[in-house]
Amino acid sequence: MTDIADLSAVDLAAAIRARTVSPVEAVEAALARIEENAGLNAFMAVCAERARAEAKEAEAKVMRGEPLGALHGIPFSVKDLTNTEGVATTQGSALFAGNVPKADAVAVARARSAGAILIGKTTTPEFGHKPFTEGPFFGRTLNPHSHAHTCGGSSGGAAVAVAAGMGQLALGSDGGGSIRIPAACCGVVGLKATLGAIPNLQAPDLFGANSFVGPMARDVADTRLMFDVLRGPDRRDPYGQAPTFPERRLGEGEKPRIGFLLRCGNILDPDIEAAVVAAMKRAEALGWVVEPIELDLVSLEPHFLVFLRSLLLARLGGHAEKTPEKLDPTLLATIEVGRAYSAAELCQAQFARTDCFAKVQNILSRFDLIASPTLSAPALPVGLDPLGPIEIAGKPAGTIRGAWYPYTFPFNLTGHPALSLPCGFSRDKLPIGLQLVGRWHEDGYLQDVAARLECVLDPFVGSRDRAVAGPAVRGSA
């Protein structure tokens, strides 16, 4: 039965409709895989009995011939930063150990309305404050490719869950690369959609929002399946006021123009460079236009840190003063640095954000997409200080945001959709990610291009050809 856990979401949905796989079997397969991989520590909570009850009802709907949602019977997980009705949402912190929301976040509600079955909450560093999924409240989440290397963060548990077959789909969140970083580290696909395309009403500042929720899966088709359910305006979101969002898709025979950003002011690991250059050569072999571009993103790091540290100070400064023993020491240190910023520095950060948006818009007036590495190096070794300097390719590279993921956090500030796609392996057999960035509200076009490129990249190809065994009609009742 656990082979069902290896089915794609697209294939599983088709099998459930064809009655060759039951939602009950799908949930049991996911729960069995979670138990088998408990050592990876990808889940903060598993809601097994609730999932089993929902799976039985989902199976009954199939057998009664009722209309089925796009995600009917598919197991999915939700990052522990995102509210889930009746299931603990701790923010990865002892501060919220007993917090059980009374309502689902918009994205969770939309997934469940489409028939998806919540199997549990995945791990995140406390309040998503660092790119390593570890903390005093739950320990460390392990990368299934190498326990000696980080799974990334802050949606690390989500990436590990889908990589190891613990549910076909996962809902992550991304405040500076937190979907794309672990997707690259674990060899899965992660999408940070256009600002407002998937409502995220939990953000405390919706007008200056740079935090997104979005889908993670093992391939682009599955990511699209979930995105199509999650997307859509919401009048409570200042960026979701339009009755509909515009739609653009990749036309038959269309040759996209790609602006290729190999370096952005950073040191680049040679394995990363080789993999993304090879991916661009595959794109050129398709007849696509690939041209190098220049864009300094590393210089945006100090301004991004003003946003990050100031936000954490505003949200958690009181807790840091009253109950510091309940917070991760690296979170405490991040909050304390935030106390030194002035209002003028916050305004200057806003100016830098605006300038970066203008530069990206200018590039995307000439190109359909921007392509870059997702990370400057493969998954980093565990045990590193996320607040200290790192080395890349044996050279001092600076602090972690400007050194390891300068390609990701700027697009949180500009709001453009960005997707990480597996494109190879390092010499140490660690996954490598390729990032694609599109124009606002061209999320469908972005995923079309990613899916086409996915077909011509070597790693992970062939995973779509799976057979489903079993009788023509199967039920548990």
Image (cartoon, rainbow, N blue to C red):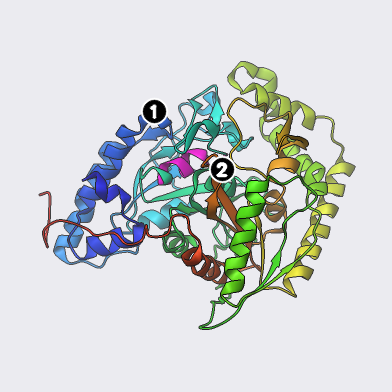
Outermost residue on the right side: it is 344
Q: Which residues are magenta?
A: 153-162
Q: Is 349 covered by the magenta stretch?
A: no
Query: Is the magenta region chiefly helix, strand or loop?
Result: helix
Give how far across and how far down residue 107 sits, in percent.
47, 54
Q: Residues within 10 Å of mark 1 (few under 14, many from 20)?
A: few
Residue drawn where x is 36% and y is 45% of the image: 165
**CA gap, disc 2 and disc 1:** 25 Å
Q: Nearer the viewer, residue 186 or 350?
A: 186
Report if residue 231 is visible in the image. yes
Residue 157 vertical position relative to residue 358 in the rendered view, above or below: above
Amino acid carrying mark 2 in the image: Arg
**In the figure, is residue 105 to the left or right of 5?**
right
Give how far across and how far down residue 158 sits, in percent.
47, 43
Report if residue 417 is visible in the image. no
Give how far across and how far down residue 24 sits, in percent.
21, 48
Q: Secondary structure at mark 2?
A: loop
Residue depth check, mark 2 versus mark 1: number of the one nearer the observer: 2
**In the figure, is residue 298 to the left or right of 228?**
right
Q: Nearer the viewer, residue 143 or 63?
A: 143
Q: Which residue is mark 1?
A: 39
Outermost residue on the top side: it is 325
Q: Secondary structure at mark 1?
A: helix
Give how far across and how far down residue 262 sits, in percent.
72, 57
Q: Residues within 10 Å of mark 2 (few under 14, many from 20)?
A: few
Q: Which residue is mark 2?
A: 427
Which quadrant would residue 60 be assigned to in this image?
A: bottom left
Q: Is 156 covered by the magenta stretch?
A: yes
